[in-house]
């Protein structure tokens, strides 16, 4: 109901989590959003991690690189205020979120596929 009241701009973020997204389920969700809602703009998002040491890109918020075992220089990336941004977790991070936003990221509820 909200989106039809904001023709000047709105977005719905669907956080896809850390697991593999089933293409059929994703297409089903896309059809429901497009055909059965007033949502005009939406984005699918998932958190990412990047090892600054060996350059491995990972889905999800990982504390350790599975390729080289690095722990201190694994950077997190996640969506904040509309776009994906560096969180600032890695020891050698050049920027990132403020402490309040970092805590909000940690407090986000994440659902596991079981």
Image (cartoon, rainbow, N blue to C red):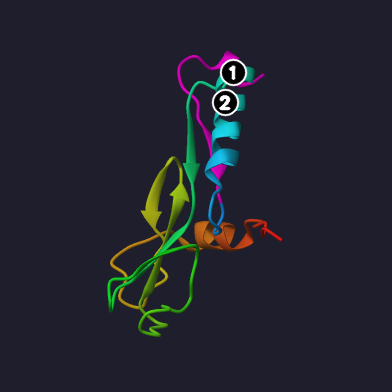
Answer whether labels 1 and 2 touch (C-beta < 8 Å): yes
Under circle 2, the secondary element is helix
Q: Which residue is mark 2?
A: 31
At a point 45% along the width and 54% down the height, the residue shown is 78
Q: Across the whole image, how many numbered discs are drawn on residues? A: 2
- The correct choice, above or below, for 6 with respect to 41 in the image is above
Q: Is residue 109 shown left or right of residue 79?
A: right
- The correct choice, above or below, for 18 with respect to 64 in the image is above
At a point 50% along the width and 30% down the height, the residue shown is 11
Q: Which corner quadrant of the image does residue 88 belong to?
A: bottom left
Question: Residue 12 at x, y = what percent?
Answer: 54, 33
Q: Which residue is more in the foreground, 20 or 15? A: 20
> Is residue 38 in view?
no
Question: Residue 56 at x, y = what percent?
Answer: 33, 70
The residue stretch that appears in magenta: 1-16
Placement of the C terminus among the 4 image quadrants: bottom right
Q: Is residue 31 shown left or right of residue 90?
A: right
Q: Which residue is more in the foreground, 2 or 46? A: 46
- The correct choice, above or below, for 4 with respect to 107 in the image is above
Give the CA separation, mark 1 to mark 2. Answer: 6 Å
At a point 28% along the width and 79% down the height, the residue shown is 53
Question: Residue 57 at x, y = what percent?
Answer: 35, 65
Under circle 1, the secondary element is helix
Q: Is residue 111 shown left or right of residue 19?
A: right
> Is residue 4 in view?
yes
Disc 2: CA contacts within 10 A as few (<14), some (14-19) or many (>=20): few
At a point 45% along the width and 79% down the height, the residue shown is 64
Asked if residue 68 is among those painted magenta in the image, a careful observer would answer no
Q: Which residue is mark 1?
A: 35
Question: Residue 98 at x, y = what percent?
Answer: 45, 60
Placement of the N terminus among the 4 image quadrants: top right
Q: Which residue is more in the foreground, 101 or 114? A: 114
């Amino acid at each position: 109901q909200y989106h039809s009241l904001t023709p000047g701009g709105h977005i719905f973020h669907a956080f896809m989590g850390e697991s593999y997204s089933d293409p059929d389920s994703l297409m089903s969700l896309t059809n429901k959003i497009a055909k059965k809602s007033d949502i005009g703009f939406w984005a699918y998002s998932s958190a990412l991690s990047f090892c600054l040491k060996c350059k491995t890109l990972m889905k999800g918020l990982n504390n350790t690189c599975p390729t080289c075992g690095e722990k201190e220089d694994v950077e997190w990336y996640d969506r904040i205020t509309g776009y994906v941004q560096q969180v600032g977790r890695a020891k050698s991070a050049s920027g990132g979120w403020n402490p309040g936003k970092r805590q909000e990221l940690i407090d986000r509820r994440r659902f596991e596929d079981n």
